[in-house]
Image: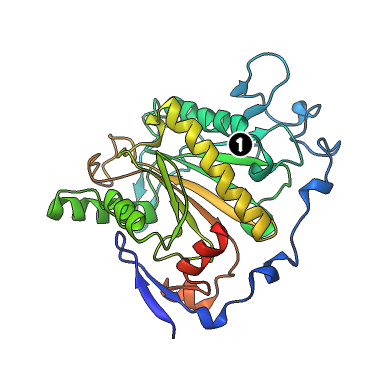
Amino acid sequence: MSEFRQDIVTKEWVLVAPSRSPRPQEFKKDAATPESLPERAPACIFCPGNEKTTPAPLAQYPKTGEWQIRVVPNKFGLLELAESPPQRDFYVRLPGIGSHEVLITRYHNQPVALQSVALIDQVLAAYTERINELSTYEAVRYVHIIQNHGKLGGASLIHPHSQIIAMPFPGPHLQEELRGANHHYDIFDHCIYCEIILHEKKEQVRVVFETERFLAACPFESKMPYQVRIMPKRHEARFNRITVEERGELAAVMKAVLTKIYHRLGNPAYNYYFHTLPFSRSTNVASNENAYHWHLVIMPRINIWAGLELGTEVYVNVVPPEQAAEFLRG
């Protein structure tokens, strides 16, 4: 029988419907094959040798010699840094304040699952450096880091890249997480995410991968089949405060989890994103560092959301998280 499950933080609902679940092998039908691609594609604007087709870099790693990572302004950016107040006649309007950057890794045929742990670690270091830089702009309240992989994941180019988007406010989903975490802390004086970590470690049925400092598990209320949430065991509200040791370990966990997804599900499209506490100057939500806990969500795009999800915001997941975790651990 299907089962409604509630997100313990945001109170959103998910419908787990295993009777509609396809076999994992069926996800491999339209899988791309990065191994068949060249390291460098002459027509790709992100590949080495085509640097002049993108705007001048905001950052490059290493700073001299052959680059492994470049961060450039998005040529078709959604937002621009500016100071402008909101306006209201009847509807509220706010200019598209912020910035939109693209982080590019060097090799055309190396999605994260095929990258080295050292390169992933350097990408994470670049993320934190860009967050710290963008935090100096008064108009920026939140920096959203995402990677879209594959056509169903919204990636417009095959070349591996991620996006760093500075926004004048955190999005509604993050605000719901913040409200839920603050509400739980006000009542129980504990971080709800720390409690989730302890509960998942005890039950073990949804754990995919665990290290000394991190836990990767399929959330109880997963919206998508094989969704994974990676959380640091040390309580910390802000991702950009990650230590060097934690960063290296997170790189290894990301490599392990994305490799499992890549091989076991046949390189499906996916999105990953970080949720972290907005900058303290935000007036949109309460900023309690004791209540919130940063985390990384990896969401394979297995389901296509349709009228039920879009009309009710009750998401249908055809693979129970317990079954998904067991398969990925396999």
Q: Residue at x 51, y 64 (%)?
A: 326
Give 83 or 288, whichever is nearer the viewer: 288
User: Between 251 and 97, which is closer to the camera in this rendering?
Assistant: 251
Badge 1 is on which residue?
A: 102
Circle 1 packing at 10 Å, graded few (<14), some (14-19), many (20+), is: many
| Corner quadrant of residue 2 | bottom left
Percent coordinates x, y for residue 299 in the rendering: 53, 57
159 relative to 136, above or below:
below
Residue 133 is situated, as x and y percent measured from the top left of the image, at 45, 25
Query: For the residue marked with disc 1, what is the amino acid?
Result: Val
The quadrant in which residue 77 appears is top right
**Tag count:** 1
Q: Nearer the viewer, residue 95 or 136?
A: 136
Q: Quadrant of residue 279?
A: top left
Q: Please identify the quadrant where the N terminus is shown.
A: bottom left
The secondary structure type at the circle numbered 1 is strand
Q: Quadrant of the C terminus?
A: bottom right
Res. 71 in view:
yes
Residue 79 versus residue 32 in the image, above or below: above
Q: Is residue 154 visible?
A: no
- Give percent across and percent down for residue 302: 60, 66
Q: How far across and down, in percent of the image, does residue 75 sit?
A: 66, 37
Q: Is residue 178 toward the left or the right of residue 259 in the image?
A: left
In the picture, measured across the screen, residue 161 lies left or right of residue 319, that is right
Residue under the point 64% across and 42% down: 112
